[in-house]
Image (tube, coloured by chain):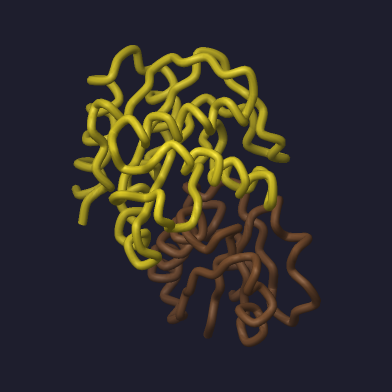
Chain colours: A brown, B yellow
Amino acid sequence: MKIVAICGVGLGTSGILKVNAERVLDRLGIDADVTASDAAHIEEAAADAQVVLTSPELVDRIGPTNADVIVVQNYFDLEELERKLDEALG
Amino acid sequence: MSLPPLPDSAITVGAHAGGWREAVELAGEALARSGATEQGYAQRMVQVIEEFGAYIVIAPGLALAHARPGPDVNSDGLSVVTLDEPVVFGHPHNDPVSVVLGLAVSTPEAHVTSVAELANVFNDPGAIPALAAATDIADVQRILSLSEENAAR
């Protein structure tokens, strides 16, 4: 399973999403490959991903995709991430 | 694994900003003061927000300003600016912002380990309010290192 964390420049904020998503997936016992990408490469990055994690500000930049798009409000709230990932994957 | 260097010179406590742009510029000034970046890096952080919006406000009250690596980045670095009055960035959920972090990385790979450490600090929900209430530089250093110790337990 592939999960992509998207931010504007593919650094910093998507890195935090990636790290915290990995923690939550570990907790949920889900095996997934989480990568960080930027808005410019959103289409290719999301093409073969099951889940896209991003900010409410960037969600409109994601074009048509078969992936579940999860909008994360607080990147440091592991419970929010766990609830949303569990809904999408569980 | 550790946070990017955060020398005292990269910390500004209780600064006043007239808006999000000034707040990000303060974080950029702090990075330049510490030697991690040149002055121009601040405007590149502003441009990221102009281009992509306020997505860098990643938690209530906290903005993580950053730009891509470039020739204006001398070394990996972090800056912390706390504001006397919170400012609005235009984020649908996490405004207003009272703590702005500035992040500079010299290579795209460098960010992975440093942001992992940031997550350790800020996954503690008390860290942002504590930083916002910090009264001096030592307070800021203590909060960041205390949170780090807590995460290691």
Location of residue B149 in the rendering, given as x and y in whole percent from the top left corner? 19, 41
Specify the quadrant of the image occupied by residue B80: top left
Q: Give me the residue at 68% from left, 45% from top.
A: B50
Specify the quadrant of the image occupied by residue B126: top left
Q: Give me the residue at 55% from left, 66% from top.
A: A5
Q: Nearer the viewer, residue B83 or A23?
A: B83
Number of disc labels? 0
Q: Nearer the viewer, residue A19 or B31?
A: B31
Location of residue B131 in the rendering, given as x and y in whole percent from the top left corner? 39, 25
> Does residue B2 lie above or below B39 as drawn?
below
Location of residue A87 in the rendering, given as x and y in whole percent from the top left corner? 63, 67
Q: Give me the residue at 47% from left, 47% from top.
A: A76
Position of B96 with respect to B132 (left or right) is right
Location of residue B94 in the rendering, given as x and y in whole percent from the top left corner? 63, 36
Specify the quadrant of the image occupied by residue B9: top left
> Does residue A76 lie above or below A39 as drawn?
above
Position of A24 with respect to A51 (left or right) is left
Task: Name the image quarter holding the C terminus of chain A.
Answer: bottom right
Q: Give me the residue at 45% from left, 80% from top.
A: A33
Q: Nearer the viewer, residue A53 or B125?
A: A53
